[in-house]
Amino acid sequence: MYANSYQSLPSDAGIIFLGNAGSGKSFLCNCIIGHEQFEHDFRTTAVTTVTEYHEVNIPEKFNLRIYNISGSVEANQKRVEENKRQIMKAFEECPNSIVIFVWTQNGGRVNPNDVVAFNALNAAYAFPAESLAFVVNDLPPHRNSRRNYDGEFLATLKVLLEPMKVSVKDIIFIDHIEPGHEMKLTDARTKLLDLISKHYILPQTRCADIILELEQLQKDLCDIKNKQMQAEQDKEKFKRYAEQLQNELADSLSKQIKAEQEKIKAEKDKEKAEQDKKKADQEKEKAEAERRKAE
């Protein structure tokens, strides 16, 4: 069941993907939609440079606009200003939404540019916690050989975003997926839909300007890197915290898988019940026809 009931959704409801260039927003949008609607590729420059959306019907009969928006932090201030305009345009067109911020990793660690971008956007819109979700995208599948990687990433993210609260239900981790790998694409779509189902579509109101000035960005990046280093200085404490979060993430994933299995079972049971009823009705009609014939 989705956090919003279908009847309560406004006509301009949607899901707005935010994140820096190259984070894979277009890929994630396509994943939800179920086909290649938005262009995506691996490039040194942004693939998406204007606001674009596609209306889609997802489980529970939700008709939503899926917004794919250009990145935030770039080396050119002119591009940054255009990105800001495109972001504001999306929220003006779709003020009632779930916001999904897409995170990337840099050498296995939280990308400081993403923290800068998120902080600037959150300062401008004060995203309601119930409508805000995170996706850590395009992770190397072999990271599983490094114990507690996801827990470490989340632990660092929670520290960097303090005092904001980040729960395990608010974040998912998606591996890098090669084109044509349908099983992994299906798994990623299931994760995304489950993430969406746990959040509310709420009004997103701009309460301040989006401050993304290149000079200030450099200062913010230094502050974030220092904060990240300080968080990791007490290695034993950080390790214990990461392990705790890793266990919580594993438990959350286990519950999701169990719920999906129960849903599939319920659908199969319902289908079987309908088939049994149809068969019983046919046998009843046959018996009735034979009785009338005998008379």
Image (cartoon, rainbow, N blue to C red):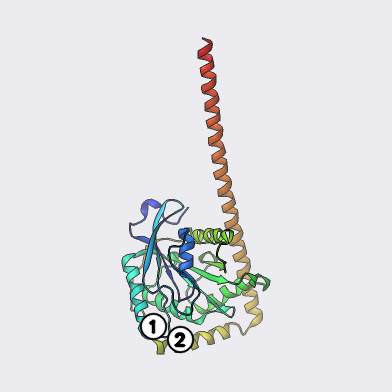
Identify which residue is drawn at 58% across, 71% down: 139
Q: How far across and how far down the image is residue 138, in percent?
A: 55, 71
Disc nearer the start of the sequence (1/2) = 1
Res. 275 mark: none
Query: Mark 1 near mark 2, Cβ–Cβ under 8 Å?
Result: no
Identify which residue is drawn at 57% across, 43% down: 268
Q: Which residue is mark 1?
A: 212
Quadrant for residue 80, please give it: bottom left
Q: How far across and how far down the image is residue 179, in percent?
A: 55, 65
As drawn, the residue found furthest toward the front would be: 180
Element carrying mark 2:
helix
Identify which residue is drawn at 51% across, 13% down: 293
Q: Is 85 left or right of 247, judged from the image as shown?
A: left
**Measured along the vertical axis of the image, is residue 244 above or below residue 219?**
above
Q: How far across and how far down the image is residue 163, in percent?
A: 48, 76
Q: Which residue is mark 2?
A: 220
**Measured along the vertical axis of the image, is residue 267 above or below residue 5?**
above
**Mark 1 and mark 2: Cα distance apart in space:** 10 Å
Q: Nearer the viewer, residue 260 or 75?
A: 75
Element carrying mark 1:
loop
Q: Nearer the viewer, residue 109 or 65?
A: 65
Q: Nearer the viewer, mark 1 or mark 2?
A: 1
Q: How far across and how far down the image is residue 12, in percent?
A: 33, 60
Mark 1: amino acid: Leu
